[in-house]
């Protein structure tokens, strides 16, 4: 089975991501002459151009393409690469995911055993231990805040309609039949979720592949995640307009916030105090993004009454 491995480079405003998966791709145990790598760069990054050139020279058996996109949207990058792909199977891989040696083998084996075009394989992206030492990063991963479900090990119960764009394999014929990602999504937020809604409605289902592991090289911070949540809020407004009949889980975050916000916990505060603080900060950022999208658009019927009072934080320890 020929596999097209697709990576679309995204922005890194906080300089917190390692976006160089080439050594890990070169170490794949799947036959290199059955893999093509398609890397999409929207930033004209000279280091990426040089890395791709070096990779191509060092791995001549593995077909490698570098595409330049005029848009920084992940949806555009994935669609552009999928249109150029000649593999039967597409593997979508986040730009800060370093695949373990058997990642492609695990995805290809699943689809060889299950040729149903509706089937999707989902692999985990796991923080390395050095990143998991940070409580905020560990909480983000273990709670499922990052990707929608926690994926640190084999899951006893898997949500069969779960899809994400970080480490997923899908037949090219199915991707094309669905029209790819909706390119109106400007950010890597809710674009894969919206694709997943259409995929699931067409009969799609996914299987967690514990062996298709990638290391998530991303030192997340509260500041960065708040910026991402603002983008997520903006994208949620578009998602609401595209899929108005779907009951979205994020509607709960649109409820009016408390008038008095939690203070920054003290140095020795228990974990639950920090989790409560983090949650309030992230939800406040989401509401800011959502309100911003409303202000810049002709609003349809709102799912909830949105409080327009700015969110405030009391500084200081407790």
Image (cartoon, grey):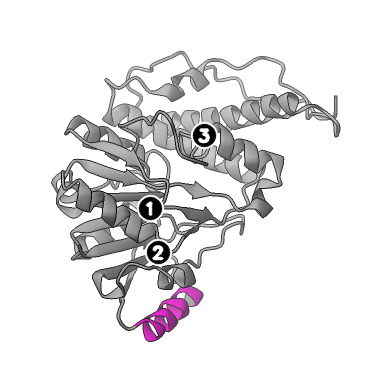
Query: SS for tag 2?
Result: loop
Q: Is residue 205 left or right of residue 43?
A: left
Q: Which residue is mark 3?
A: 144
Ranked by sequence position, the earlier of labels 1 and 3 is: 1
Circle 1 residue: 73
Q: Is the residue 116 above or below the residue 60 in the image?
A: above
Q: Residue at x 23, y 37 (%)?
A: 199
Report crowding for label 1: few under 14, some 14 to 19, many 20 or more residues within 10 A (C-alpha).
many
Looking at the image, the residue that sits furthest to the bottom is 57
Coordinates of residue 124 in the picture (x, y in percent): 45, 46
Image coords of residue 272 (percent x, y) = 72, 24
Nearest the camera: 229 or 164? Answer: 164
Where does the magenta region start and end?
47-59
| CA separation in Å, label 2 and label 1 | 8 Å
Whether residue 139 is situated above or below residue 92 in the rendered picture? above
**Front disc: 1 or 3:** 3
Element on which disc 3 rests: loop
For marks 2 and 1, the one nearer the N-term is 2
User: Residue 180 or 302: which is nearer the viewer?
Assistant: 180
């Amino acid at each position: 089975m020929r596999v097209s491995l697709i990576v679309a480079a995204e922005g890194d405003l906080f300089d917190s991501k390692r976006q160089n998966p080439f050594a890990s791709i070169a170490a794949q145990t799947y036959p290199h002459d059955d893999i093509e790598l398609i890397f999409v760069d929207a930033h004209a990054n000279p280091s990426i151009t040089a890395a791709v050139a070096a990779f191509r020279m060092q791995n001549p058996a593995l077909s490698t393409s570098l595409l330049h996109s005029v848009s920084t949207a992940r949806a555009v990058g994935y669609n552009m690469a999928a249109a150029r792909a000649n593999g039967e199977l597409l593997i979508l891989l986040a730009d800060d995911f370093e695949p373990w040696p058997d990642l492609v083998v695990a995805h290809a084996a699943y689809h060889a055993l299950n040729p149903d075009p509706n089937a999707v394989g989902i692999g985990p992206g796991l923080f390395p231990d050095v990143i998991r030492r940070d409580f905020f990063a560990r909480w983000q991963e273990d709670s499922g805040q990052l990707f929608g479900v926690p994926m640190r090990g084999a899951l006893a119960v898997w949500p069969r309609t779960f899809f994400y764009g970080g480490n997923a394999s899908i037949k090219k014929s199915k991707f094309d039949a669905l029209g790819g990602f909706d390119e109106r999504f400007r950010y890597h937020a809710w674009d894969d979720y919206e694709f997943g809604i259409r995929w699931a409605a067409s009969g799609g289902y996914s299987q967690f592949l514990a062996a298709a592991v990638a290391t998530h090289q991303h030192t997340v911070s509260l500041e960065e995640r708040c910026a991402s949540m603002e983008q997520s809020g903006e994208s949620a407004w578009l998602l609401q307009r595209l899929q108005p009949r779907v009951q979205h889980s994020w509607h709960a975050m649109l409820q009016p916030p408390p008038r008095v916000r939690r203070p920054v916990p003290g140095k020795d505060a228990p974990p639950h105090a920090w989790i409560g603080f983090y949650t309030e900060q992230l939800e406040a950022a989401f509401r800011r993004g959502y309100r911003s999208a409303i202000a810049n658009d002709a609003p349809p019927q709102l799912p909830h009454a949105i409080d327009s009072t700015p969110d405030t934080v009391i500084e200081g320890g407790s």
